[in-house]
Image: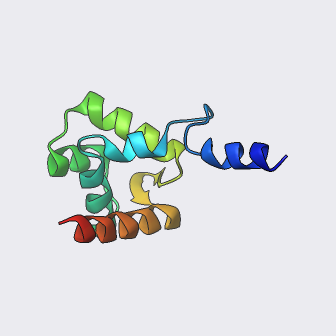
Amino acid sequence: MPKAKEESNIDVVSKNNGPNPLKVLGRNGVYSILLSLHDEPLGFSQLMFKTQLNPAILDRHLKALMELNLIDKNKKYNLTPKGERVLTLLNELLKTVR
């Protein structure tokens, strides 16, 4: 029985109910999106200009970030409280490895 519980803990990141958070966060440009939205809510064109991502890639990243509940959209895209926490953790991680 304990083994099943252990396996379920391991599978949390790789379950097939949505995008893999680590893969999404590792994509080129995603950190830039999160940083940009930390400053202020932005529309699609503003994000495209600020991040220099092409529209198709930006759209894919935004959809994945919304699926993970890291950002939401109400006219403009903005970070959710969960997204703020993730950005804080990413910044701490980057400070540690640099």
Nearest the viewer among 78 and 18 is 18
Quarter where residue 78 is shown: bottom left
Residue 54, percent across and down?
A: 19, 33
Q: Is residue 56 above or below residue 76?
A: above
Quarter where residue 84 is shown: bottom left
Quarter where residue 89 is shown: bottom left
Count every numbered label the image shows and give the total: 0
Coloring scheme of the render? rainbow
Q: Is residue 9 above or below residue 88?
A: above
Nearest the viewer among 91 and 60 is 91
Residue 66 in view here: yes
Q: Residue at x 43, y 63 (%)?
A: 86
Q: Residue at x 32, y 71 (%)?
A: 92
Nearest the viewer among 66 and 97 is 97
Residue 65, percent across and down?
A: 44, 46
Q: Is residue 38 above or below residue 76?
A: below
Horizontal side of 7 relative to 45 (left or right) equals right
Q: Residue at x 57, y 35 (%)?
A: 18
Residue 40 in view here: no
Q: Is residue 3 above or below residue 84?
A: above
Horizontal side of 70 relative to 33 (left or right) equals right
Q: Where's the C terminus, which quadrant? A: bottom left
Residue 5, percent across and down?
A: 76, 48
**Residue at the limit of the structure toward the top, as seen here:** 56
Residue 56, percent across and down?
A: 28, 28
Q: Residue at x 39, y 53 (%)?
A: 77
